[in-house]
Each structure stands twice: as C-alpha cells, then as structure tokens.
Amino acid sequence: MTQSMTLAPGSLAGQLRRAERRRRLFAISLTLPLLLFLLATFLVPIGALLVRAVENPEVANTLGKTAQSLSHWDRSSAPPDAAYAALVEDLSAIQEQSDAGALARRLNSEVSGARSLVMGTYRALPFTPGMTPAQVREHMLTLDARWGELPYWQAIAKNASRWTPDYLLASLDLKRDVQGNIVKVDAESAAFGRILMRTFQISAVVTLCCLLLGYPLAYWLSTLSARKANMLMILVLVPFWTSILVRVAAWIVLLQSNGLVNRSLMGLGLTDEPLPLLFNRLGVVIAMVHILLPFMILPLYSVMKSVPATYLRAAVSLGSSPLAAFFRVYVPQTYPGMGAGGLLVFILSIGYYVTPALLGGADDQMLSYYIAQYTNVNVNWGMACALGAVLLTATLVLYALYRRVVKSELSLG
C-alpha cells in the first residue's frame, strides 16, 4: 500500500510532463508551416538582398589572374606588362558572352566607356599564340588605345575583391577613391541623399495628412452604435478591395486639367483656370493619403473604442470645459493608436513606388523608384540591393525609436 502511494505521484508527474511535451510539439507542428513560409518568403530574400548589396562577383569571377597581377600595383603608374597578358588570358577563358557582358557593365558603372572597351577586346580574341607580355601590351594598345589609360585599370584593381562597400557607399553619396579611401562624391553626382530626404519628407506629409483626416473620422465612428459603425467601416475598407492601379488611374481622371476637380472649382468660381494637380507633389500626396488613410483609421478606432466615454463626462462634471477635457483627458489616451497608425502609414509610405511614378514629376520620385530603375533598366542588382538595404535600415530604426518611446511612456505612466 505504501509503495503504490509512493509510485503514484511520480507516475502522475511523468504523465503530466509527457502531456506537456505533446502539447508543445503539437503547437510547434501547427506553427511550423508558417515559420517555413516566413523563412522562404521573407527572411531568405532579405538575407539575399543584404548579401548582394556588398557582393562584387563580376570582376572576381572573371579576372582572377589580372587581379593577382595588379595586387602590388601602386595604381598611379602604368600597369605592368604581365597585367596585359593576364587580362587577355582571363578574357579568353570566359565561355559565355553573357559573363563578359556582366563584366563590361560592372566596369562601365565605374568608368564610362569600359563596356565598349571590354567587349571590343573580347570579340577580337584570340590573339596570336606565343606572344610575350610586352607584345600583348602593344597589340592591345594597337587594338584600342584606351588600354593605356589608367582609369580602366584602376577600376579593375578596385573591384578585384569579391566583397565591396561601394554600393552602400554610393547609396549614401560616398565613394572610394583610387587609393581606397572613403570620400564624398562631388556635388553634381550627389543625388541619393536628396532622394532619401525627399522620401522622408513626402512620407511625413502623407502621415500628417492621414492623422488630421483619420482622427476625427475614427472618433466619430467610435461614438456611433456598433451597427452604424460597422456599416460605415465598410466604406473605410473599400480601398482595400480595389487595386492600387485602378485608384491611381481614377485620380488621374479626377485631377487632370479637364477633370472633375478642376471643373468643379471653376464652376464654383473659385479659380479662373485649371490648377496644376497632376504630375506634381500635390497629386502624389492626395493619392497616397487616399490609399493609406484606412491604415491610420483602423488603429485609432480600435484604441478609441476602448476609452470609456465616462471619462469625458467626469472631467466636464468636475468643471473642465468640453474642449479642454477632450484634449487633456481623451487625446492622451489615444496616443498608442496615433503612434501605431503613424508608424504604419510612414513605413508604408517610404516604400511607395507606383503612385509617385504615375502621378509625380521628375522631382517627386521616391527611393523605391530608383530601386526599380536599377533593377529593370540599368540591371545593377548591387546598387538596387544597397538602396533597398537603406530603406530596410530606415524602417528598422523608425520601429526601434517607436518602441523606445512607447516603453518610456509606459514607464512614466
């Protein structure tokens, strides 16, 4: 009897541990498909983007012997004859013309004219066998005198390493000089700093407009009955059910010179001629606010519904004016919704591409436009990934600042 009573608790504890283990394994099995999906569609692409932003494989994969012969070159005097012979040997070893084209494009991004120089030399191969390095040099100079210019050889030596910070530096308007020192680009070439500031500026304006429009609407919805609020919330969610391209096309029709907006303003006598509402900053902001407004309303509405209406009545009954009670009692309790909605709208705004590309002018394009330009037009994946990494970093910094502000407010509260 005593032995059975002694074993019973141990047996029960073992059964509980096994049951808890089965419960955990079951929970993991339910979440495992989602984790694998996120890994395949989110984490792996981001990791590939970050790697490609610092990877420089074109020269390293094709001109290995040339890079080795230039490893001790001072980059200020003429390259040695052995470098010419190594370059011919490396170019002769390239089997696919697409690989030569990728090499030519990479060097052309460093020095203008390198594409025609490399491809012209590649098509002229093979040279006469048994030539000495000095004879190879003379033959290459005869073929194209640009092989005697230092910038082309400096570009090869500079990009000999498989890993490079050049793309990330260029996205910040910096570069490496001939000796490898980091310096600022000249004022005429500095563009991405202004583009990044423009992206933040447009995103901040859109976020502020969404807050000014969404706050009173969310407050009004929170004061209605559940049935009326649900019916009106459907109207708020309608943009989610419509393609962005369709909405942008509709704004083009509305904002053009003969569109509904200008004709209404002229019909009311407010303007004598059509206003420039299209292909400028104003048109971009209007369309982006319309598309992103629900992302501000939904967090605000969810927070406002949790604020008891008795707080305002209590403040008024204690002698406060209704306006003062609203701003001093009600508004502070909606700060979490304002912060969440503002962060969501701002992060979505800085990555916008379609709306500025279709409704904006040349000076209204955001950073994502240039990412698409480098991807689809220039076929410079390294630069596109570097700009994407800048956007990703900006998003993470903003989120970290938001979390820090929220934690400080909760600790003070």
Image (spheres, rainbow, N blue to C red):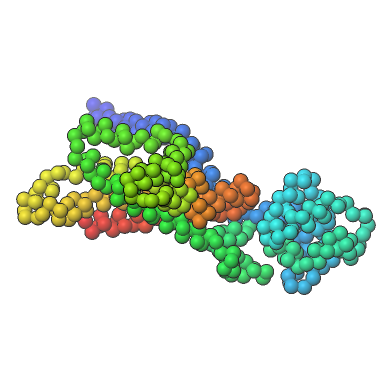
Q: List x then y, in percent, for residue 327.
A: 19, 54
Which of 202/388 is in front?
Answer: 202
Q: List x then y, in percent, for residue 352.
A: 47, 47
- Quarter of the image with the N terminus is top left
- Residue 80 lies, with reference to residue 242, above or below; the image says below
- Residue 69 lies, with reference to residue 268, above or below; the image says below
Which of 112/99 is in front?
Answer: 112
Residue drawn at (12%, 45%), measured in percent from left and top? 310
Image-quadrant location for residue 261: top left
Residue drawn at (13%, 48%), measured in percent from left and top? 311
Q: List x then y, in percent, for residue 390.
A: 50, 56
Q: List x then y, in percent, for residue 171.
A: 55, 59
Q: Seen in the image, is 393 located left or right of residue 229?
A: right
- Residue 330 lies, with reference to residue 79, above or below; the image says above
Image-quadrant location for residue 65: bottom right
- Quarter of the image with the C terminus is bottom left
| Residue 347 visible in the shown view | no
Which of 313/10 is in front?
Answer: 313
Q: Seen in the image, is 124 located left or right of residue 306?
A: right
Q: Seen in the image, is 55 located left or right of residue 24?
A: right
Residue drawn at (65%, 55%), measured in percent from left and top? 56
Residue drawn at (36%, 32%), measured in percent from left and top? 23
| Residue 76 visible in the shown view | yes
The mark tally for this picture is 0
